Amino acid sequence: MIKENIFEVRKRIASACLKAGRKADTLKVIAVSKNRSIEEIKEAVESGITEFGENRVQEALLKYSAVAARWHMVGHLQTNKAGEAVKIFDLIQSVDSLRLAREIDKEALKINKIQDILLEVKISPEEAKFGLRPQETPGVIREVSAFKNIKIKGLMAIAPIVKNPEEARTYFRILKSLRDQIDSRLILSMGMTDDFEAAIKEGSDMVRIGRAIFEN
C-alpha cells in the first residue's frame, strides 16, 4: 500500500509541477512519519523516500537509530527539547521564536554542530497555529543570522484548513512574497497532504506529506 501511495503522490507532484512550469525533481518530499511504525518507515525507504518528518522529539529518538535517513523536525519544538533535537535532526523546520533559535544555537555549540533550520511563519489566522508574524520575520532573521551554530535555510508555514485546496494558494503566496522580499535563495517548505499541489503552484521547494503516503 505504501509503495502504491508514494507512486500516486509522485504522479500528482509531477502533474502539479508541469502545470507550474517546474521540474518535479527539484521538489523534496518529506514523509511525515508521526505515529508510524519503523516497519512502515522502512517500506517507504524501499520505495525511494529518503527524508522523514517527525512532530515529537521522543518519538523521533526511537526511529532515528533504527532507520538511516534524513530527519526533519516539523512539529512544535519546546525549548527544553532543543538539546535532544540538535542531536538527531538534519533540519529543524519549526523554529517559531527568537528564544527557541537562541536555545538551539546554544545546544548545537555544545556538540560542535551547525544546525540547519527553517523559520516558521504564521500565515494562518487560526489562533492555534504557531509561527513568527510575517512583519517580524526579517528582524528575527537578522538576529538569528548572527548566531554561529545555526544556519537559516528557509521558511516554513502551515496554511489553514480550507474547503477547496486552491483557496490555500492565497496563504502560500504570503510566504513566497515574504521570502522574495528577504532573499529569493531561501527555500520554502509549504504544503501537506490536503494542499501540496496548491503549494507547488505557489513555489514550494519542500512538501510534508503524511496521510497520502501512509494511509489507505
Image: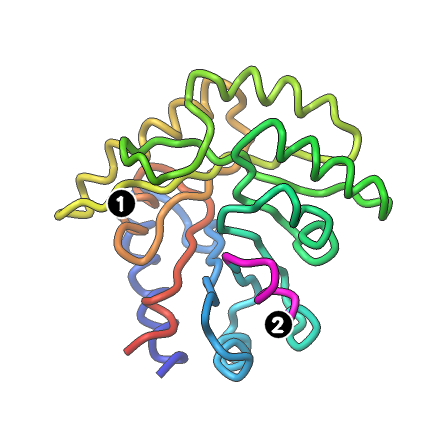
* Front-lying residue, 113 or 197: 113
**Mark 2 surroundings within 10 Å by alpha-carbon count, few (fewer than 14), some (14 through 19), many (20 or more):** some
What label sits on residue 63 in the rendered view?
Answer: 2
Question: Please, what is the three-letter code of the amino acid marked with disc 2?
Answer: Lys
Count every numbered label the image shows and give the total.
2
* Front-lying residue, 174 or 88: 88
Query: Residue at position x 39%, y 79% from top?
Result: 2
C-alpha span from label 1 to label 2: 31 Å
Question: Residue 21 lies in what quarter of the image?
Answer: top left
200 horizontally vs 108: left or right: left
Give the magenta part as a residue range: 55-63
Q: Quick check: 11 above or below 4?
A: above
Q: Quadrant of the N terminus?
A: bottom left
Q: Pinpoint residue 205: horizontal percent, then vertical percent.
A: 46, 44
Callout 2: SS: helix
Question: Residue 72 lies in what quarter of the image?
Answer: bottom right
Nearer the camera: disc 1 or disc 2: 2
**Mark 1 surroundings within 10 Å by alpha-carbon count, few (fewer than 14), some (14 through 19), many (20 or more):** many
* Residues at discs 1 and 2 in contact (Cβ within 8 Å): no
90 horizontally vs 188: left or right: right
Query: Residue at position x 71%, y 54% from top?
Result: 84
Callout 1: SS: helix
Report the residue marked by disc 1.
198
Q: Quick check: 154 above or below 174?
A: below
